[in-house]
Image (cartoon, helix red, strand yellow):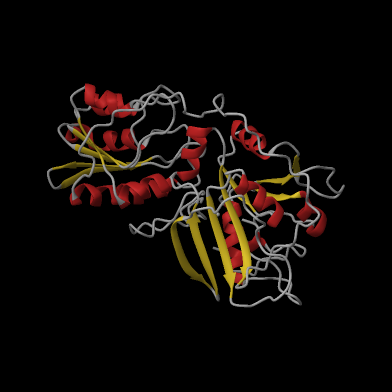
Amino acid sequence: MNRDPVPPESMHDPATSGPPRSLLGASSEPPRSRLGAASEVPQRHLGVSSEGRQTDLGATSDAPRTDLGATSEEPARNLGAGLQGSAGDRARLERALELAERGRGTTHPNPVVGAVLVRGDDVVAEGWHERAGGPHAEAVALERAGERARGATAYVTLEPCSHHGRTPPCADALIEAGIARVVVGSTDPTPGRVGLERLREAGVDVTLVDGEVAFCARQQNEAWRVWAEQGRPFVTYKVAIAVDGRVVVPGSRWVTGEESRRLVHELRASSDAVAVGTGTVHADAPQLTARAVDAARQPRRLAFGRGPLPEESELELRPGALEDELYALGSEGVQSLLLEGGPTLATSFLRGGLVDKVLVFVAPVLSGAGPRFLGDLDDPVELRRLESRAVGSDVLLSAYVHEP
């Protein structure tokens, strides 16, 4: 990774604007720190300016999202009992999760998936989904195994597909190859998918694991899962603050350090879109590009709120109600959104229940003045799976509002 200093972006501190795709486990699609496979991608920063001017952001829509992927009408699936899996099953799935990460950045818009085929105590083949349009992980492993696949156990990070897309159904391929047992890390949330049911109907022994390895399998594709099931992007809110919750430090251009700012650029590079509010656009003229890091493509750069934007701004204005804009972005293929807006925009997203994950970079300083990173909320927001780690001299707090 390029270790040159991150170029400044006017007065806008990237660490305050919002993760994995695999850097932090998010959205963004997260790091595999718990199970050993560390991602080089962001699953997701540094001073945020006040958005006091930003007012008309649009009310969040109360309309149900039943037409864009919501699953309220989807019948509950009977996935069977005995979902825990053995210690050996979990260890093999951990290896499959590592393999899946090899496809990070090349499978979009598909999820990353890994597969391991085992007979007795011997691994006979491994595979992962390498690129969109290419063979899926199960198909790769089956081809490498040949006749050795008959009677084997397949460990797959995601439920084998049951539909004809650009490739044939993996559930059918496993059945035809004579696989005796399939151990799955996570279900496919896409409405109408029945890969596990098809395998069971064909007499294949199916185990859907639970526990930490199951969470890691869901986390690995957290952005894709929200997009596939709900039809909107996975939203990560990122902010940089002083210990007293202020988003500016008097006399300083940045709130957090260089390491945090670099991580923000990696998070941008791993996100489909990055957004601020129109107040930040007028105050800071942010570019929202990923700079001085490996970036296969630049994210879409958005501004939520009422226009017009300054003539020199290159951001895309999204003036509608926030929820409506999110579902519109989902229909355009945006799976992950890094929210880098100031207090007004962040508060609106949280009030609307539209934030899935939060990343808070905390600098070792008491600011003593300036706006705080959130306004008043209607109710407390419970956070799950709170974690912390050092990023240079800063501390990064990460947690889920909606756990995958």
Would you place residue 36 above or below residue 202 in this image? below
Residue 99 in view: no
- Residue at 64% across / 32% down in the picture? 328
The one of 391 and 400 positioned closer to us in this rendering:
400
The image shows residue 66 at horizontal and vertical percentages of 54, 25
Residue sitting farthest toward the left: 120
Count the marks: 0
318 with respect to 136 (left or right): right
The image quadrant where one finds the C terminus is top left
Looking at the rendering, which quadrant does residue 302 occupy?
top right
The image quadrant of residue 14 is bottom right
Q: Nearer the viewer, residue 23 or 81?
A: 81
Q: Nearer the viewer, residue 52 or 34?
A: 52
Locate residue 156 relative to residue 359 in the image: left or right.
left
Q: Residue furthest front?
A: 378
Residue at image location 35% in from the left, 51% down from the top: 98
| Picture coordinates of residue 378, whole percent (x, y) | 61, 50
Instruction: Please indicate whether residue 247 sits to the left or right of residue 388 in the image.
Output: right
Measured from the top left, where is residue 189 in percent x and y? 42, 33
Is residue 116 in view from this perspective?
yes
Q: Position of residue 188 (x, y in %)?
A: 39, 34
Q: Residue furthest right?
A: 311
Placement of the N terminus among the 4 image quadrants: bottom right
